[in-house]
Every structure is written in C-alpha cells, then in structure tokens.
Image (tube, rainbow, N blue to C red):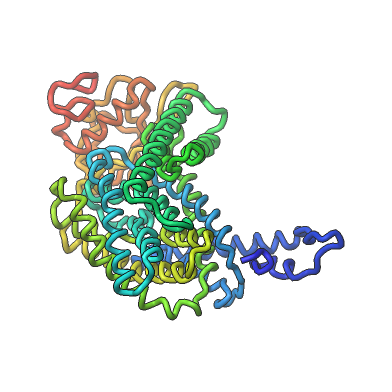
C-alpha cells in the first residue's frame, strides 16, 4: 500500500515520470492542478445530480456515491488505482466529524430530550447485544476466527442517521421514533469505534469489564468536553457581534471541530464530543442561523460525497466474489436476529409500542461508518483484513438495497405517520444587531391550525408585530383582521427581549388555533404570564 502504487485521475501520469535529479518528485504543475480540479468538479456535479435519482427511487444516496467511486476505480471505466487504507481512514474520520457536526446541528432538543434515556441504552446496551450475536453468527455460520468475527460484529453495529433519514424524509414519523433513531446514530459511533480499535490491536483483548470501564471513561470525557465546548461556544457567539454574517457559520463549524479535537486529546470520545457540542450549538438560537444551517448542510454533502467516492475507489470489485455469501449470511444474522433483539432488550424498560420497535429494528441502516471502521484492521495489519473490508462492503450495499426502499412502506403499514409533526411551523431568525431586534420568517405548512386565525388573534407580545404576508407569490402588509392561510409566509419583527416569547406564542397558536387565544406565550392553559395573555 505504498505511495508508489497510488494514482489519482489526472495526476496518474505525474506519478510515472522519472524522479528529479535531487531524488524528489517533480512539482505539481498548474496544468495538473487544473485537470484535477476539473475531475473533482465533474464528480461533484454528477453526485449532486444523482441525489435526484436516489430521492425518486427511495435509495440512500450513499449507494450512488459508492457506485461513482467503483466506476472510477481500477475495475471501472476510470482505471484509477487506489489502495491507501491509511489515507482513506484519515479522510473518513475527518468526513465523519463534519457529518456528525451537521447532524448535531439539526437535532432538535425537544425531540431528543424525552427519549434521551432510551436512545442512550440502545446505543450502549444495544451495541453490545448486536456485537455478540453478529460475532457468534460470523464464527459459527461462516467459520471466521473469533477476533475477525468480533471485529466484523463491532464494525457493522453502528447505524447511520444519514442513510435512515434520506429514506424517511418524506414520511412524518412520531417524534419518539425520529428522536430515538437520530440520537442513537449520534451516540453509538463512539462505543463502536472503541470496540473496533480494541479488537484490532495486536495481543489479547482485555477482560470484558476492563473494556467496559474504558468505554465508559472515554464516553464520559467526550460528553463533558462536548457539552463544555458547545456551551462556551454558544455563549460567545451570542455575546460577541461578528463584523460579517458569513463568519458565523465558519465559527460554528470551528467550535464543533474543536470539541472533537479536545475530546480526542483528552483521551475521550471525540465523536461523541463533536455531536453533543453541535447539538448544543444547534439549539442555542444563534444569530444568522439559516445561513449557518445551510453552510453546515453543504459541508455535510461534500463530506459524504468525498468519503463514499473514496471508499468506492478503495474496493476492488473482482475480489468480492468469494465474500458475497459470507456477507449475506452475516447480514442476515445482523438484520433478522441481532438488531431486533438489541432493540427489544434495550427498550424493554421504556414500554415502547411494538409497532415502533419493529420500525426501529428494520431502520438500522448501515452506511459510511462501518466501511470507514473496516479500514482500521487494515491499517493495524490484522490477518485477512482485506476480507473483513470486502465482507463489510458487500453487507452494507446489499442490505441497504433491501432495507432502504422498504422502510417507507413498512412505516405506512405500521401506521406510524404523524401528521401533527408535519404541521409544525418553520421559523427562521435573522438578528438585526444595530436595531436590537430580530426578523422572524414564519412558514405556515399544510395542516397547521394557524389556518383561519386573524392577525390580531395571534396575541403577540408587546414589541412584536406581523409586518408582511407573502401569499401565492404576492406580498402585502396585513391588517389586524387579515385571516392567515395555509402556505402563507409571514415576516414578524420582534425586539430582542421578546424574541423567544414571540416564537413560543406562534408555536402555541399553530398547535391550538383560535383556542390559543386563551393560552399564554408558553402555550400552556391559563391566563398567561406576559403581554401575550388575554
């Protein structure tokens, strides 16, 4: 896997040129750089266009990106030879940090808080159950040695939120289901990484109780670092006015990456640290949040595309033939036995309905993380590590093809669609620093109970007012008696002291409709506690 065997697109010819007289490679010229940029930009454009295909077919986009990498590889039309597992692991870790940060920024605390305990148990106890059962299947059914079986069991026990929600994004599920799946996928990466590293290290594996203690310590350190960095970062961004709005997204991502680095350097879980820090930042009502969210989503897409294309390059398709059946058998044990049992055992104390447990069992999609983790034994020189990588690759691709398109169908059959969640308001805030105010952009979705409510019935706090309504592409200044409709977009101006109360009041009206005239700004029954009360 030396550098002399690596070749990347337009720089392939550069690697074949003779060395310079001083024993150094000739410098990369502007022409080679232009060619490389052209290839990268074309790959990005093809990947972006492929998202449309994946959205229509119901398949996670990761399969499309992996396919692009395979087509570019040595068995494809690109004939690019790439076998550097170390570089793949480094880039994969960096991409995973960005993906976890983007996922944490989009995690709603109000959805995660009620299911935090159940998601944590599922991410810890569930991983242990899944690793044990899957490893047993790999050992007794496929004949792998115990160390190899344990590595595969640990590698494939981490779920991928991006894969799950790319399939379920059009289905409004109950908050308990989405919150549990999202939190589990953010939490279970950390213990799985620790297990894979432990099983891939030369020498005997430590006693189980020592390993459990190490996992608990690293998770505790990572959680503490993530929460501390996230809180300090959100406090700083709220109290320090940056000179340009474009600096806020950069600062937010830098804080999230800082959490990862701080957690890792403190011998904790950097992955848990970055996810928790991003979740704190995402729920802190930071200035210029729409721009920050869009910036993070863009970086997340770039990270996914680059990572999956690189993983597709790393695999050698003609070597996969002997590992197809072992991958199918291990995947069957994982999907039909290990995942359901891990869900049932973990959620038993929480009395989760059977329908939701069935969906969570089938929604355990594997994506980027298992394939990245499969490079760890390759880097550590574990015997037959290439076979482990091939088995994991086939397993992820095949079972994503099976589970992905059937998830929406299963959700509908289980009648888990929740229209109330779909009717929630979309509110974005842009701060007006010099005016000490906020401009709220409010979208009234289909099914919202705000339909038919007059502007004066909103009962916004003193210091807040609806200044503009956009309806059917036309904008107008509303009167107090203007009746709001589904599909309207409102511009609400609020002074800084009543910004939060205004958003709470708007959401209360969206939930209660005209009956919310009897609710306070917190959306609770009674006279209310502010100027929003009757």
In the image, residue 363 above or below residue 398: above
488 or 274, nearer to the observer: 274
Q: How many numbered marks are there?
A: 0
Residue nearer the viewer, 339 or 28? 339
Q: Is residue 175 above or below residue 248?
A: below
Image coordinates for residue 517, horizontal then vertical, percent? 16, 28
Residue 525 rendering spot, x and y as whole percentages: 13, 27
Q: Position of residue 2 (x, y in %)?
A: 65, 65
- Residue at position x 85%, y 59% from top? 22
Q: Is residue 87 above or below residue 293?
A: below
For the N terminus, the image quarter is bottom right
81 with respect to 130 (left or right): right
Q: Position of residue 252 (x, y in %)?
A: 48, 37
Identify the residue at horizontal 46%, vertical 77% (top origin).
Answer: 320
Task: Find residue 6 and report its image quarter.
Answer: bottom right
Asked which quadrant contains residue 330, the reply is: bottom left
Q: Is residue 105 visible?
A: no
Q: Is residue 306 left or right of residue 80?
A: left
Outermost residue, right side: 21
Q: Where 62 sits versus 128, above or below? A: below
Q: Is residue 389 visible?
A: yes
Quadrant holding the C terminus? top left
């Amino acid at each position: 896997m030396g550098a002399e065997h690596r070749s990347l697109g337009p720089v392939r010819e550069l690697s074949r040129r003779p060395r310079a007289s001083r024993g150094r490679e000739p410098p990369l010229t502007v022409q080679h750089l232009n060619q490389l940029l052209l290839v990268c930009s074309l790959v990005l454009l093809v990947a972006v266009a492929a998202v449309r295909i994946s959205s229509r077919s119901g398949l996670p986009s990761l399969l499309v990106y992996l396919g692009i990498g395979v087509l570019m590889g040595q068995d494809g039309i690109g004939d690019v030879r790439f076998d550097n597992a170390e570089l793949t692991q480094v880039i994969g870790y960096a991409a995973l940090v960005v993906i976890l940060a983007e996922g944490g920024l989009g995690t709603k605390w109000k959805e995660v808080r009620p299911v935090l305990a159940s998601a944590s148990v599922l991410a810890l106890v569930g991983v242990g159950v899944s690793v044990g059962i899957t490893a047993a299947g790999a050992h007794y059914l496929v004949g792998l040695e115990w160390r190899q079986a344990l590595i595969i069991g640990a590698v494939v026990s981490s779920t991928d939120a991006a894969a799950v929600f790319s399939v379920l994004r059009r289905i409004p599920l109950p908050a308990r289901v989405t919150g549990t799946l999202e939190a589990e996928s953010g939490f279970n990466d950390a213990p799985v990484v620790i297990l894979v590293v432990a099983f891939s290290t030369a020498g005997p594996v430590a006693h189980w109780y020592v390993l459990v203690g190490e996992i608990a310590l690293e998770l505790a350190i990572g959680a503490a670092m993530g929460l501390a960095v996230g809180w300090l970062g959100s406090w700083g961004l709220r109290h320090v006015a940056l000179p340009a709005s474009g600096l806020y997204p950069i600062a937010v991502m830098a804080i999230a990456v800082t959490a990862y680095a701080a957690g890792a350097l403190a011998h904790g879980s950097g992955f848990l640290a970055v996810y928790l820090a991003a979740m704190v930042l995402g729920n802190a009502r930071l200035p210029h949040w729409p721009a920050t969210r869009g910036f993070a989503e863009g970086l997340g897409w770039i990270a996914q595309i680059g990572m999956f294309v690189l993983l597709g390059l790393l695999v050698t398709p003609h070597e996969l033939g002997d590992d197809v059946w072992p991958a199918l058998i291990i995947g069957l044990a994982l999907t039909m036995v290990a995942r359901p049992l891990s869900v049932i055992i973990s959620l038993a104390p929480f009395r989760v309905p059977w329908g939701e447990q069935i969906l969570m069992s089938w929604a355990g999609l594997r994506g980027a993380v298992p394939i990245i983790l499969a490079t760890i034994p390759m880097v550590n020189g574990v015997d037959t590590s290439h076979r482990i990588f091939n088995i994991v690759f086939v397993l992820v691709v095949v079972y994503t093809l099976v589970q992905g398109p059937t998830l929406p169908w299963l959700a509908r059959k289980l009648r888990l669609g929740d229209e109330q969640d779909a009717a929630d308001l979309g509110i974005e805030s842009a701060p007006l620093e010099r005016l000490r105010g906020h401009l709220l952009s409010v979208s009234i979705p289909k099914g919202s109970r705000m339909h038919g409510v007059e502007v004066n019935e909103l009962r916004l706090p003193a210091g807040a007012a609806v200044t503009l309504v956009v309806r059917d592409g036309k904008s107008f200044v509303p009167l107090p008696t203007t009746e709001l409709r589904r599909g309207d977009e409102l511009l609400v101006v609020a002074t800084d002291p009543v910004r939060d109360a205004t958003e709470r009041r708007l959401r209360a009206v969206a939930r209660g409709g005209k009956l919310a005239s009897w609710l306070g700004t917190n959306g609770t029954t009674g006279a209310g506690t502010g100027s929003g009360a009757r």
